[in-house]
Image: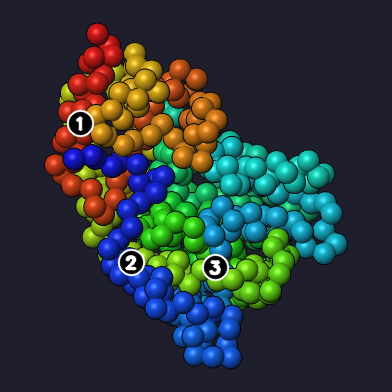
Amino acid sequence: MAIYLDNHATTRLDPRVLEAMLPWLSDRYGNAGSLTHAFGREAREAVEVARAQVAAAIGAEPREILFTSGATESTNLAILGSAGRPGRDTGRLVSWESEHSAVLDPLEHLAGRGFEVAMLGVEDAASASAGRIRPDELAEACGAGTFLVSLLLANNEIGTIQPAAEAAGLAHACGAVLHIDAAQAVGKIPVDVDALGADLLSLSAHKFHGPKGVGALFVRRRQRVARLSPRVFGGGQERGLRSGTLDVPGIVGLGAAAEIAAASLEAEAASMRQLRDRLWEGLISRISDVHLNGPALADPGQRLPGNLNVRIGGVDGQTLLATLGEGELAVSSGSACSSATPRPSHVLRAIGLDDDQARASLRFGLSRFTTADEIDRAVGLIADAVGRLRA
């Protein structure tokens, strides 16, 4: 049976989530905007229940949750919506070289329109905190005119968990808003918008066993009110910031997935961390010249519990991936969003690896459904494939 260890790309839909969604895919088909009849009111009520579930999972209030098609749209709305405020034609945005393309591409677009964009570095591969931001550099970069800082809470390739609360303090001190991309963090580690100091926060259902094509953006409406301009215009749904007919089945699934993840977070994180360490120990015991990419495994606060990224000397990563795919083991070399452009990972380059080292790297993502037997079988498949390629 195939082994799936690519859970940073997407996760299996939890059967409990599917069960919650099914009625809204068949008998309950009302438009949540049609409030003149029972069908629409029933759909609206389901949406509001899900809004409360998502809010509770991240320590927000329901009125601070906007539904979108996923973290990419949420992130674009956060960045472009901040830059598009009336009267804002210039200004400074700060982010990091290791961010997801959903952040990097909007920032590049704004740079082309005349905005100043500061891209900072991260700790290099030799550090036990590889991939971690340097707060002193943020303090230096976050000067007058800075209106937005965007930070990836947990890296989607090497699993680095960032000191978001410290970054928030520095951003707010210079009058900037902090956007947090929490797509990989929600459901894996505790995420509380107040503890993190987030003003905007993006998430995606399919990263924590919900359906694809639905996500949310937290927009703070307490203490520091975050203000955005819409990027999509139409019927005025979601307080006018994201027009379009609401995907009721998807939103119900997002709410259910968020509630399940919040309830089981601690136990699942411990299980994934144990299996991740089992995978690492298995690889280094069976294969020579294996190196860890990213922060050390010993400190649980440094790295996502289900993340492992390794490079294997003397092996081309793409060839190894193709070989493993034939053996029904699903792993990857980096972000699924970048696989259409097979360049060496920009994240691995950001921590100082060269092209050959980046190409020799594999990314593993574990989930609540990963088993010890799958880990042991995966180690065997990888060791056999590496042996054949080296021979």
Q: Residue at 50% of width from left, 20% of height from top?
A: 355
Q: Which mark is residue 379?
A: 1
Q: Secondary structure at mark 2?
A: helix
Q: Which residue is mark 3?
A: 67
Left or right: residue 190 versus residue 178 is: left
Gap in angstroms between the C-alphas marked 2 and 3: 17 Å
Counting residues from the start of the chain, the first of labels 2 and 3 encountered is 2
Image quarter for residue 111? top right
Gap in angstroms between the C-alphas marked 3 and 1: 39 Å
Counting residues from the start of the chain, the first of labels 2 and 1 encountered is 2
- Residue in the foreground of this view, choosing between 325 and 115: 325
Q: Which mark is residue 17?
A: 2
- Residue in the foreground of this view, choosing between 46 and 303: 46
Q: Residue at 30% of width from left, 23% of height from top?
A: 323
**Residue 35 seen in the figure:** yes
Gap in angstroms between the C-alphas marked 2 and 1: 31 Å
> Dot 2, how many residues are within 10 Å of its Cα: few (below 14), some (14-19), or many (20+)?
many
Provide residue 96's location: percent of width, then percent of height. 59, 41
- The three-letter code of the residue at mark 2 reads Val
